[in-house]
Amino acid sequence: MSREKEWIDRLEEEKELKQEEWEALFQYWLDHEDKELLSYVCEKGKRVKEETFGNKVYIRGLIEFTSYCKNDCYYCGLRKSNKEAERYRLDEETILDCCEKGYELGFRTFVLQGGEDFFFTADRIGELVRKIKGKFPDCAVTLSEGERDFDTYKAWFDAGADRYLLRHETADEAHYRLLHPDSLSLENRKECLRNLKKIGYQTGCGIMVGSPGQTARCLAEDMVFMKELHPEMVGLGPFIPQHATPFADQKPGTLEETLFILALVRLMLPKVLLPATTALGTIHPEGRELGILSGANVVMPNLSPSDVRKKYLLYDNKIATGAEAAEALDSLRERMKAIGCEIAVDRGDSPEL
């Protein structure tokens, strides 16, 4: 047996590797893209997911409520310097209407995601969360609204927010500087994630697979950081370039590498909620199914009004029709059924870790 398979076996057994082992494993993958090793780890990821969650796939209703952002991250189509971006903000009535339609379709988790838009103040989002929870008390609310201070996160949690998704993008300082302007810092990002855990949120972090400048060492640091943080959710998908950003000409992340890392995260954090992301479905027509078959257990159909879906362009060619649209939930159910899975109609909280 190869040393790479031995490391994967030990990861399944002990739930961690040393940083130098992670780095060597990722370097081997980047050098060889070994299909046999990919199949080996994905089969294990699928088995561990099934042992923990059965054949359930949890659905989250995604509401992309603002495309404004104060930041200028080099990879993101919502960056403030992108003059081509069509900006919008959903009003409270529209957001509540999205939740109403989602509830009727069977969604029991709503994910409010947007750029870092300080028009949505602490009080404004707090009031919105209270109204959603008041109207749909059996539902979970996930927020994904970037970096805020401890008191703001605490106020939103006290208002009823259950989960918070804040992808760290990279745990390597040099890599972080390649991806972000000087106004942002990796240490603050990590501090935000630790604050969210401290407050009591089910907390999600995550990375872009294949982002510009990402090395085996970067990926090793990501795995060590995620193990230390012990998040309840990990959102990871392939980097996809956006034409109006400095990274427009960079190569996208690959399906294979994304599946490889998805499966490794499942082995390291068996109880984590792990989405098969829209980006995965964008780079391959069966990307999300392949993600589920590698250990993922969440999909996030879009509840946003159809007229704004194509304006929320984090990256190019984002899917905005078919099974991505919440109205096509029946199609999504059939697609999951075809791979032996069923859509679960409940909040789908992470088991006690």
Image (tube, helix red, strand yellow):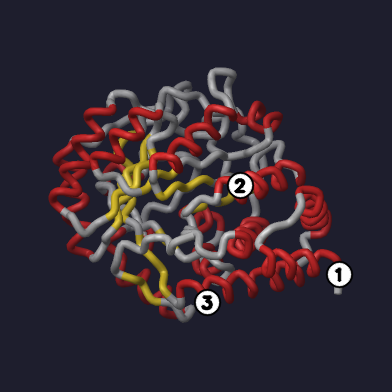
Residue at the image position 66 percent from the left and 28 percent from the top = 178
Count neighbours of disc 3 (C-alpha within 10 A) and say few if under 14, some if 14 to 19, many if 20 or more.
few
Badge nearest the viewer, 1 or 2: 2
Q: Kindly identify which numbered label has been placed on residue 118.
A: none
Pointer 1 residue: 2
> Would residue 255 be visible to someone looking at this image?
no
Pointer 2 residue: 228
Look at the numbered disc 3 and give the secondary structure of its residue.
helix
Residue at the image position 35 percent from the left and 57 percent from the top = 60
In contact (CB < 8 Å): disc 2 and disc 3? no
Residue at the image position 36 percent from the left and 34 percent from the top = 153
Left or right? Give the position of 339 relative to 85: right
Total marks shown come to 3
In contact (CB < 8 Å): disc 1 and disc 2? no
Instruction: Give the mark nearer the N terminus: 2 vs 3.
Output: 3
Identity of the amino acid at label 2? Glu
Count neighbours of disc 2 (C-alpha within 10 A) and say few if under 14, some if 14 to 19, many if 20 or more.
few
Expressed as whole percent of the image width and height from the top left, the position of residue 216 reads 76, 46
> Would residue 204 be visible to someone looking at this image?
yes
Look at the numbered disc 1 and give the secondary structure of its residue.
loop
Mark 1–mark 2 Cα distance, whole angstroms, equals 27 Å
Look at the numbered disc 2 and give the secondary structure of its residue.
helix
Pointer 3 residue: 51
Expressed as whole percent of the image width and height from the top left, the position of residue 16 reads 69, 58
Image position of 270 with respect to 86: above or below:
below
